[in-house]
Image (cartoon, rainbow, N blue to C red):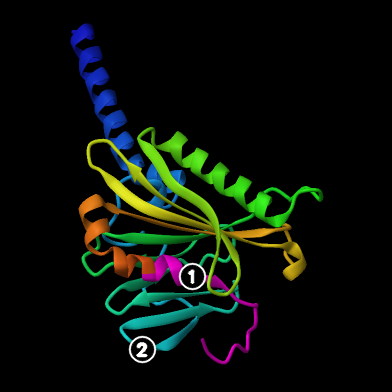
Amino acid sequence: MMDRGRGKKNLLMAGIVILVGIASVPVMLHLMGSASDDPEPVSTPTLETSDIPAGIFGSPGDGVARFADPILGYKLEYPEGWRLSGTGNEGEGVVMSILSPDGLIIVDISRRFPPPRVPEVDHETHLRGYGQAILDMAAFDSPGFEATLAEVRSMEDGTLAFATRYAISGDSLLAGDILVVIRPQSDGELPFGDEAFVVRSVAPTAAYLARNQELQTVVRGFSLIDRSEGLPGI
């Protein structure tokens, strides 16, 4: 009788462990990072996001809408019909997500603080090194990660950006873009030194190819702006 009672007790404890483990999965995924760190794209923002981000919306023109965040100091463009989801985060991490109408494509905008630039290193070299470090981390997280066409290029406003496209092979083939810009400390009072923004898109390859022109509107439409509470428009 004692052995049978002990066996039932062990089965009960095993069941509790399984239930606790299942309940912990969302928490673990949250701790692991944003949706774009996970190789699988998501169709809806996380519970920490808000449907209406804080910022300034511009009047759509030619099918393109505009948004600016004068507090964090960036602006972006996105196709009409795509949805913005602000996180309310004013620190380090994902500050904004942009989702395609079908939910298959997500673009995360993250704010980060890279290691300080060594005085002897110029801005372009510093940017290239930090961009490569981000790619190395992505490859570590996803063994099937492979970046192509990585380069430092000048954006429309003259800001230098580290840009690349990538693919992730595995159970499902994914594709996306990574854009990295760094705002030097001298351009404003930043408590942690240089400030970087990382724009990362992810989608199933078929969706990436089908809607690439719209997607590039988002990726290439990102730029830094001066922080100003009284920004009149975008």
Neighbour tally class for label 2: few under 14, some 14-19, many 20 plus, Cα within 10 Å: few
Q: Residue at x 56, y 49 (%)?
A: 131
From this view, report whether residue 67 is shown above or below residue 38: below
Number of numbered discs visible in the structure rendering = 2
| Marks 1/2: CA–CA distance | 17 Å
174 is higher (above) or lower (below) than 123: above
**Main secondary structure of the magenta stretch:** loop
**Which of the 4 image quarters holds residue 184?**
bottom right
Residue at numbered disc 2: 61
Sequence-first disc among 1 and 2: 2
Residue 143 image position (x, y, % from top left): 38, 32
The range drawn in magenta is 217-234
Q: Is residue 70 above or below residue 23?
A: below
Which residue does the image show at 25% across and 57% down from the upper left?
A: 209
Residue at disc 1, secondary structure: loop
The residue located at (27%, 24%) in the rendering is 14
- In x, y percent, where is residue 123? 70, 56
Quick check: 99 above or below 10?
below
Tell me if residue 6 can be seen: yes
The residue type indicated by label 2 comes to Gly
154 magenta-colored: no
Is residue 227 located in the magenta-colored stretch of the structure? yes
What residue would you read off at disc 1? 222
Which residue appears at 65% of the width and 60% of the height? 195
Which of the pair 134/34 is nearer the observer?
A: 134
Question: Element under label 2?
Answer: strand
User: Would you say residue 47 is visible in this rendering?
Assistant: no
Percent from the top left, x then y, of residue 125?
67, 50
